[in-house]
């Protein structure tokens, strides 16, 4: 009998040790400390490994930072926010199952995150079917809300707005009336961005000298496309390269290494340290991109965010996607506060009524039933490895 009691005691102790060991599951899920039934559970889906990691890891950092600040100030409606985050691993199937877990098992009230349209379109319908609001912190395809449903929102501007800004900048600021367009055909984001750039550029009088493509899932050698560019009878004045964050630097480097020094323009996927890390210095000079905010801006909201991020993580925020995720958490908290409830439908309704919410990346209003905010676009230039502010515009 004593032996049985002794064995049972060992099993009980081991069970308690295993249970209390860690808040992270095999799927890469993490939960905020101090979690409990009285908290408001907010799901964070970010690709913190794989090709999207340079955008999404900073996003998750800032998302948690904002939650910590809100909790330190008393929380929302007397409750603390609990962030439950999962890693989509830059894989659509994993992203889908991760959101399914957040919704069905963790019972989150809101889902937020992701910086690419392909992954949002994989994850969004899961939240939509469950009636859970989903705010993408970084994906920019303007078709997303209509494709997913009425619980889907964007925190950033749409790709049409940033592509229009890029086309206007090419024509008006670079005096480039001819363009080469290179597109990654393996991504909803890159396809949409190129489509909108061409639409605006041609409408404003520009001429496309040549269109070319590659598959971002597998291609790492762009010499064939660059050779076709160099063989044109007259070289275009600007190169619009619609690329993902893990490929944009490679394309720019190979262009420069093959003797092409024409200005390159891209979208917000370039707003990552990987651009210079993979592209090199000085090869990435004379490269421009559209993004959501200049983190060197001296505006009070920007400096406050930058200082808080540095204090918590001992480094500068890596890109504007961190600021977008920071804004997204505050946007969620604002909606929950106005709703007076963490009921998902009440949160969705409060989000729809958002008007004049001021964030680090601009002012968010969802007007006339739209679930995409109309925000200004920041244009940056790469100069010896540094991202320098050029201008801020709002295309008409």
Image (cartoon, rainbow, N blue to C red):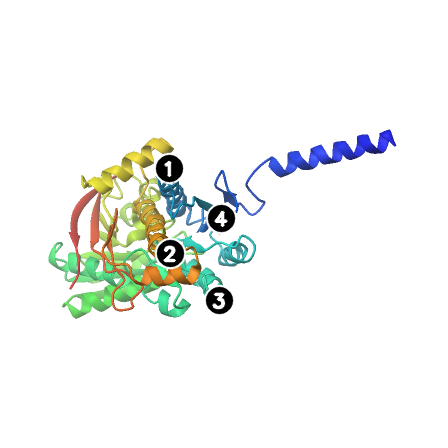
What residue is shown at x 15% (from left), y 64% (from top)? 396
Q: Nearer the viewer, residue 154 or 53?
A: 154
Tell me which label, 1 or 4, sits earlier in the chain: 1
Mark 2 lies on a secondary structure that is strand
Q: Is residue 31 left or right of residue 326?
A: right
Residue 256 in view in this figure:
yes
The Cα atoms of the two marked residues, 1 and 4, are separated by 26 Å
Q: Nearer the viewer, mark 4 or mark 3?
A: 3
Q: Which residue is mark 4?
A: 87
Q: Nearer the viewer, residue 112 or 289?
A: 112
The Cα atoms of the two marked residues, 1 and 3, are separated by 33 Å
Tell me which label, 2 or 3, sits earlier in the chain: 3
Image position, residue 103 (x, y; %): 51, 57
Tell me which label, 1 or 3, sits earlier in the chain: 1
Q: Nearer the viewer, mark 1 or mark 2?
A: 1
Q: Nearer the viewer, mark 2 or mark 3?
A: 3
């Amino acid at each position: 009998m004593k032996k049985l009691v002794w064995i049972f005691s060992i099993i009980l102790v081991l069970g308690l040790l295993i249970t209390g060991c860690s808040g992270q599951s095999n799927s890469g899920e993490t939960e905020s400390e101090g979690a409990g039934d009285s908290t408001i559970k907010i799901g964070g889906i970010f690709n913190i490994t794989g090709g999207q990691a340079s955008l999404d890891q900073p996003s998750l950092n800032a998302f948690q930072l904002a939650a910590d600040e809100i909790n330190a100030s008393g929380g929302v409606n007397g409750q603390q926010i609990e962030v439950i985050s999962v890693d989509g691993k830059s894989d659509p199937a994993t992203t889908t199952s991760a959101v399914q877990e957040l919704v069905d098992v963790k019972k989150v009230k809101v889902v937020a995150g992701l910086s690419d349209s392909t992954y949002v379109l994989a994850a969004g319908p899961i939240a939509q079917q469950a009636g859970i609001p989903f705010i993408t912190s970084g994906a920019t395809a303007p078709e997303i809300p209509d494709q997913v449903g009425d619980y889907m929102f964007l925190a950033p501007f749409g790709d049409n707005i940033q592509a229009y800004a890029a086309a206007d900048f090419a024509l008006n600021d670079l005096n480039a009336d001819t363009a080469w367009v290179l597109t990654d055909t393996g991504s909803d984001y890159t396809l949409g961005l190129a489509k909108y750039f061409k639409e605006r550029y041609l409408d404003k009088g520009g001429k496309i000298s040549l269109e070319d493509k590659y598959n971002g899932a597998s291609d790492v050698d762009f010499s064939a496309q660059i050779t076709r560019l160099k063989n044109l009878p007259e070289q275009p004045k600007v190169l619009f390269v619609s690329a993902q964050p893990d490929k944009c630097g490679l394309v720019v480097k190979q262009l420069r290494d093959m003797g092409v020094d024409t200005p390159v323009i891209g979208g917000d996927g370039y707003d990552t340290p990987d651009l210079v890390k993979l592209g090199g210095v000085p090869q990435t000079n004379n490269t421009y991109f559209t993004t959501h905010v200049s983190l060197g801006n001296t505006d009070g909201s920007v400096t406050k965010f930058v200082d808080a991020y540095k204090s918590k993580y001992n480094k500068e925020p890596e890109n504007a996607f961190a600021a977008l995720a920071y804004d997204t958490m505050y946007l969620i908290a604002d909606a929950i506060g106005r709703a007076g409830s963490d009921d998902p439908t009440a949160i969705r309704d409060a989000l729809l009524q958002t008007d004049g919410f001021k964030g680090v990346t601009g002012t968010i209003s969802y007007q006339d039933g739209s679930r995409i905010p109309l925000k200004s676009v920041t244009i940056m230039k790469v100069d010896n490895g540094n991202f320098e502010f050029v201008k801020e515009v709002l295309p008409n």
